[in-house]
Image: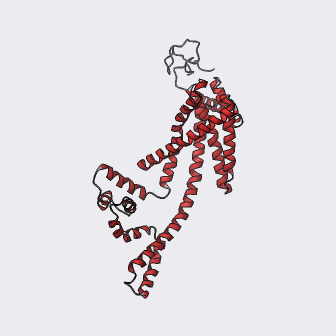
Amino acid sequence: MPKAVRKVPRCQNCDYPLETEFNFCPRCSQHNSDKLTSFWRLVVEVISDLFSYDSRFAKTIFPFLFKPGFLTNEYVAGRRVRYMHPLRLYVFVSLLYFSVFSVVVGRSVKDESDAADVTLNRVQADSVRAQLRRNLKGELSDTDMAKVDSALRVVAKAKDPGLINMHLNDDDDEEDHDDGDGELNRYLRLINTKGITENQVLDSLRWERNWRNLFKARQGIRLANLKKNEFIEFFMGKISLMMFAMLPFVALFMKLLYVRRRRYYMEHLTFMLHIHAFTFLVLALALLYNYYADSDHAGWWATLLILVYITVAFRQVYRQGWFRTLSKMFILFMSYSISLAFFLLLTLAVSALLV
C-alpha cells in the first residue's frame, strides 16, 4: 500500500497558496509534497522529461526540414508546447555546426599551414644565401664563397630562417627607422625574435615607455609565440558567440524592413532563429561531405538549398508577392553581409586582445 503524501499549504517552489486537493502547483507544476523527491520518482521524472523532449523533437524535425516558415507561424500563433523552442533548436544545431566547423576547418588549416611552412623555409633560406652572397661578394675568393654557400644550405632545415635574415637587415633597418613601413617591418621582426622582452622591443624601436606601447609590444610577442593554429582555433571558438550576438541586430533590421506589417520584434527574431538553424544544419552536412569525400561540390548545392529554403520561408511568414519578397531579401542580404563583416572584424580584434 503506497504511503500517504503529506501536502503543504503553500508551494515550496513559488509560494503559491495550495488547496488540500491539489497534487501539483497550478503556477509552477511542482509536486505538492513536503518530502524530498524519492529516487524512483526522480527516475520517473527524468524519463518523462526525455520522452517529452523526444516527442517535441519528433514533431519539430519534419516541418523544420521540409516546411519553411511553418514553425515560425506556429510559434507566433501560440502553438508552442508541441514543438522545440526556437532558441533551443538554434542552440542545438549551432553547437553541432560549430563543432563540425572547428574540427574540419581546423584540420584543413593545419594541413595547409604545414605545407606553407615547408615552402616558406625554402624561400627564406634562398633569400638568406642570396643576401650573404651580395654582402660578401669581392671579399672572399670563389672557393671560400662555395664553402659558405654549402654551409648555408642547412638554413633550409632551420625552424625560423627569418631570424637570420633579420640580423642581416639590421643596417638597413637603422636607415629606414623613421619610415613608417620600415618601422612596422622592424617591429614584426623584433616580436618574432626568440626570448625578446617588451622592453627590448621598445628600446630597439626607440618607443616611449607608456602603457600603450608596452601593450603593443607585449601582445605582439604573445601573438608571435603562438603556434600556427592556436590563434585560428581561438578565433573560431568565438565565432559561435559572434553569430548569436549578431542575431538581435539582424532581427531589428527586419523590424525596420517590415515596419508597415506591424509585427512584433520577437516574431522577426523567431524567424531568424529558425532560418539560421536550418542554414547551420545544411552547412554542417556540406562540410562533412566535402571533408570526407575530398570534394567541394556540396558547397554549391548547400548554397542553392539554403537560398530556396529562405525564399519560401519569407513567402510563408510575411505573405508578400514575389517582387517584394525578393527585393527585401536582397536588401537584407546586403545588410547582413555588411553586419557579418563588421562583427567578424570586431571578433578578430577582440581575439587578438584576449588570446
Left or right of 348? Residue 293 is right
Quadrant of the image containing the N terminus: top right
Count of numbered tags: 0
Vertical arrangement, residue 214 with respect to residue 116, above or below:
above
Left or right of 227? Residue 56 is right
Vertical arrangement, residue 320 with respect to residue 286, above or below:
above
The outermost residue toward the left is: 209
Image quadrant assignment for residue 265: top right
Which of these two is toward me, 22 or 118? 118
The residue shown at (65%, 29%) is 318
Left or right of 317? Residue 345 is left
- Residue 207 seen in render: yes
Q: How is the image coloured?
A: secondary structure
Left or right of 48? Residue 223 is left
The residue shown at (52%, 45%) is 341
Which of these two is toward me, 288 or 119? 119
Vertical arrangement, residue 83 with respect to residue 151, above or below:
above
Residue 141 x %, y %: 40, 87
Residue 39 x %, y %: 57, 30
Residue 261 x %, y %: 61, 25
Residue 352 x %, y %: 43, 50
- Residue 60 seen in render: no
Image quadrant assignment for residue 208: bottom left
Vertical arrangement, residue 139 with respect to residue 216, above or below:
below
